[in-house]
């Protein structure tokens, strides 16, 4: 293609892609072909896509261009290449959940989020890699192997939406659908240098109860992108109630993308580096987040350190997480144990040991955590934390052994993400700096209940004064 540098096209925002497709400056077929060419080159290195669907993508792009040629009304994502995490059932496309149990499963229908993306005109490039049933914060499984971080191939991209985040960071599609049950959109967005949004629970209908059991009330679908405006665009498409999900919320009476043009006059921000319980944070992460928080003062917004203490978060998360997987997968354990991730087997075994009284206690404590967070938001509009306590660690580990030279337990590296799965509040990870070794560092922006809009507006304001998109991973 002579019109444009191919790499620039691969890293173009989805909003800009939509504009050039509408004017036919570039067709959806041209853009899709350039990105497919890049996937064929880069994916063997990082293993982001587990099931590419290039023929399907070409068909969708061709149909999209015909609609433009006829002058018909275009969808919000018309002709834009998009990836789908392999936990999201997608009609006619193999969806494995990263598990040998479903290695050859081809769904007969789409989950709501995928259906809405299709109806908005997106072009599906394929499914992205995930750990088995999304159970851990790194990305590997016994079917497709390990996904690697595009900034350093010896490091993890995080998980469980690790394939999605690695793809977006590498220019293998501008939009990715991820899901987040304990940080699984925000963790890989942080490690890969993307913007990832976990909307308020229920904002995007989700159909995960069949995968996670009782843990499903922690799970949110959400976008992973390179530009804040692209997250708003995806949310405009996917938000809104659906009778298949009793927890789903009504669609707002405004466009997130249009409202993104407005900057709030007065915002009161509180920031915490420990949420009252996080035991350790890497010094480079701490400095990067503190430097980033100060930048909000340029808008005349109030910024202050706060004392917020969340109790029982780890025990609540552990109880729901393990018992949810135990409930869902116990029937398969005898037949499939030797073909399941050993770490997942251990999670199931732990979950089976919880009593009804244990789970009820966790439910009560969950409500207490929710009340504590809501109490904080009576006085503040936004809560800022690090996204994670460290930057990307070595491939092959489920968690780092040490952070800042201190030995840590398995959940100590992600204390800031899962509390907001417990409460359901909207939260985003935005790049805010780089380690001395060139690895991305993320800052978490948490909003009031139901208020993704302010999270997006604050994110956009930070993006304007601290953009990160000109820095891309390099491959030999």
Image (spheres, rainbow, N blue to C red):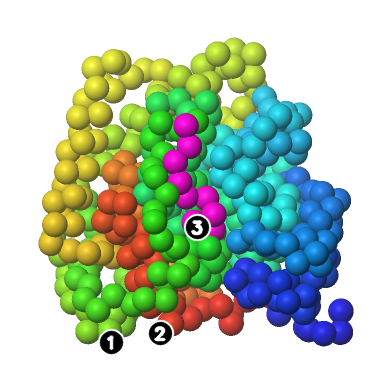
Image point 59% across, 47% down: which residue? 116
Q: Which residue in the protein does label 2 denote?
A: 465
Determine whether 379 is above or below 85 in the image. below
Q: Does the rendering let one see residue 394?
A: no
Left or right, 195 with reference to 9? left
The span shown in magenta is 234-243
Where is residue 241 drawn, in percent x and y? Answer: 44, 41
Q: Does the rendering let one see residue 368?
A: yes
Whichever of callouts 3 and 2 sits on the residue coming sooner in the sequence is 3
Where is residue 372 drawn, in percent x and y? Answer: 16, 47
Q: Which mark identifies residue 236?
A: 3
Look at discs 1 and 3 and give the one toward the viewer: 3
Q: Is residue 236 magenta?
A: yes
Residue 280 or residue 323, whichever sits in front: 323
Residue 440 or residue 13, whichever sits in front: 13
Query: What SS does tag 1 mark?
Result: helix
Left or right, 264 with reference to 306? right
Q: Which residue in the protein does label 1 denote?
A: 298
Image point 38% across, 35% down: which residue? 247
Q: Mark 1 to mark 3: distance in Å?
A: 29 Å
Q: Mark 1 to mark 2: distance in Å?
A: 9 Å
Query: What SS does tag 2 mark?
Result: helix
């Amino acid at each position: 293609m002579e019109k444009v540098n191919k790499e620039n096209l691969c890293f173009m925002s989805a909003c800009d892609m939509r504009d050039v497709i509408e004017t036919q400056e570039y067709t959806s077929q041209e853009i899709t072909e350039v990105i497919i060419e890049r996937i064929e080159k880069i994916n063997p290195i990082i293993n982001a896509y587990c099931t590419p669907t290039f023929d399907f993508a070409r068909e969708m792009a061709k149909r999209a261009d015909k609609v433009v040629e006829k002058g018909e009304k275009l969808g919000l994502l018309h002709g834009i290449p998009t990836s789908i995490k392999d936990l999201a059932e997608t009609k006619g496309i193999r969806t494995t959940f990263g598990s040998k149990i479903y290695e050859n499963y081809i769904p007969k229908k789409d989950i709501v989020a995928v259906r809405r993306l299709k109806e908005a005109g997106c072009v599906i490039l394929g499914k992205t890699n995930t750990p088995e049933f999304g159970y851990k914060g790194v990305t590997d499984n016994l079917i497709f192997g390990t996904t690697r971080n595009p900034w350093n191939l010896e490091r993890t991209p995080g998980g469980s939406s690790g394939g999605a985040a690695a793809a977006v960071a590498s220019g293998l599609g501008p939009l990715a659908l991820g899901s987040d049950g304990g940080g699984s959109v925000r963790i890989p967005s942080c490690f890969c240098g993307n913007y990832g949004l976990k909307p308020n629970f229920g904002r995007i209908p989700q159909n995960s109860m069949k995968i996670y059991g009782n843990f499903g009330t922690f799970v949110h679908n959400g976008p992973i992108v390179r530009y804040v405006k692209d997250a708003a665009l995806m949310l405009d498409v996917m938000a809104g109630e659906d009778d298949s999900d009793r927890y789903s919320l009504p669609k707002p009476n405004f466009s997130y993308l249009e409202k993104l043009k407005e900057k709030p006059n007065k915002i009161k921000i509180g920031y915490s580096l420990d949420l009252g319980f996080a035991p350790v944070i890497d010094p480079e992460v701490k400095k990067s987040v503190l430097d980033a928080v100060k930048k909000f003062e340029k808008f005349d917004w109030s910024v202050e350190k706060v004392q917020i203490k969340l109790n029982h978060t780890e025990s609540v998360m552990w109880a729901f997480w393990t018992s949810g997987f135990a409930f869902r997968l116990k029937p398969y354990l005898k037949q499939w144990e030797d073909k399941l991730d050993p770490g997942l087997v251990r999670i199931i075994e732990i979950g089976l040991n919880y009593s009804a009284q244990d789970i009820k206690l966790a439910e009560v404590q969950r409500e207490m955590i929710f009340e504590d967070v809501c109490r904080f938001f009576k006085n503040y509009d936004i809560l800022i934390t690090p996204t994670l306590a460290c930057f990307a660690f070595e491939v092959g580990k489920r968690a780092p052994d040490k952070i800042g030279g201190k030995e840590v337990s398995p959940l100590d590296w992600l204390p800031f993400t899962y509390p907001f799965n417990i409460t359901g509040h909207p939260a985003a990870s935005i790049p805010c700096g780089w380690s001395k070794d060139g690895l991305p560092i993320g800052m978490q922006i948490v909003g009031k209940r139901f208020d993704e809009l302010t999270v997006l507006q604050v994110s956009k304001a930070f993006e304007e004064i601290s953009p990160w998109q000109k820095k891309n991973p390099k491959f030999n």
